[in-house]
Image (tube, grey):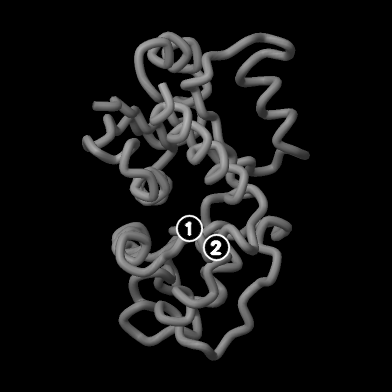
């Protein structure tokens, strides 16, 4: 049985990572070891640990590009320019945030938010995918809007039900296959997991 560890920044990224693993029975035959603390600083600081773990099992590290210019800069910083890293270590980057991957599945997005808004055709190019999603949510049905959008007068960027609502939606409606057609960074992540699953099955 293949052992998989999934390291993420937050609850929503964790739900997305679990959904991606579920596409491959060989990677999902046992529940993944979930490694999460809020923020990418935790992921970056543990890179040596992820490398060591990857000598014994599959380790998927899922992070956001945020404000960096391109994924190559993040990879060079986290992995070390020119350094080898185990084949079992999959460092995958959402451009610019995991919300861009969510915005890429228009069919599921319509079920969540309604079809009053125009959804982005190239969500990876958005400077702030999360803020874009929150703007779309302002026109969503009331129950969804109240979960996702922060109440007026609060300092919070999002509603208190943001993570739970989107995590449930990721589990039940969001399709990585559909979303990858509009998100190159998600397509690369899916391809990396597919190749890893194929390698395990052929071993």
Mark 2 neighbour class, 10 Å CA radius: few under 14, some 14 to 19, many 20 or more? many
In percent of width and height, residue 32 lies at 28, 34
**Residue 23 as seen in the image, left or right of residue 91:** left
In percent of width and height, residue 37 lies at 36, 32
Q: Residue at x 57, y 13 (%)?
A: 85
User: Looking at the image, which residue sits at the far front?
Assistant: 202
Between the residue at mark 2 and the residue at mark 1, the CA separation in whole angstroms equals 5 Å
State whether residue 173 appears in this view. yes
**Residue 126 as seen in the image, left or right of residue 38:** right
**Residue 170 as seen in the image, left or right of residue 176:** left
Q: Residue at x 35, y 12 (%)?
A: 56
144 or 78, nearer to the observer:
78
User: Looking at the image, which residue sits at the far bottom?
Assistant: 116
Instruction: Report the quarter where the C terminus lies.
Output: top left
76 or 180, nearer to the observer:
180
Instruction: Report the quarter where the N terminus lies.
Output: top left
The quadrant where residue 164 appears: bottom left
- Which residue has dot 2 on it? 179
Query: Taking 160 as reference, is 6 above or below it?
Result: above
- Which residue has dot 1 on it? 176
Disc 2 vs disc 1: Cβ atoms closer than 8 Å? yes
106 or 190, nearer to the observer:
190
Query: Taking 41 as reference, is 126 above or below it?
Result: below
Q: Secondary structure at mark 1?
A: helix
Q: Secondary structure at mark 2?
A: helix
């Amino acid at each position: 049985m293949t052992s998989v560890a999934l390291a993420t920044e937050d609850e929503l990224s964790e739900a997305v990572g679990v959904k991606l693993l579920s596409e491959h029975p060989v990677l999902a035959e046992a529940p993944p070891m979930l490694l999460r603390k809020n923020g990418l600083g935790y992921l970056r600081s543990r890179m040596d640990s992820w490398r060591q773990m990857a000598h014994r099992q599959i380790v998927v590290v899922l992070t956001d590009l945020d404000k960096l210019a391109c994924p190559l800069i993040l990879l060079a910083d986290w992995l070390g320019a020119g350094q080898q890293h185990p084949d079992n270590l999959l460092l995958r980057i959402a451009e610019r945030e995991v919300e861009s991957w969510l915005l890429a599945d228009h069919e599921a997005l319509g079920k969540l938010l309604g079809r009053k808004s125009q959804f982005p055709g190239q969500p990876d190019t958005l400077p702030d995918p999360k803020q874009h999603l929150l703007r779309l949510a302002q026109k969503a049905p009331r129950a969804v809007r109240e979960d996702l959008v922060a109440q007026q007068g609060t300092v919070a960027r999002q509603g208190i039900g943001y993570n739970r609502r989107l995590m449930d939606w990721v589990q039940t409606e969001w399709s990585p296959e559909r979303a990858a057609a509009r998100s190159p960074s998600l397509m690369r992540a899916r391809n990396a997991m597919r190749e890893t699953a194929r390698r395990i099955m052929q071993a």
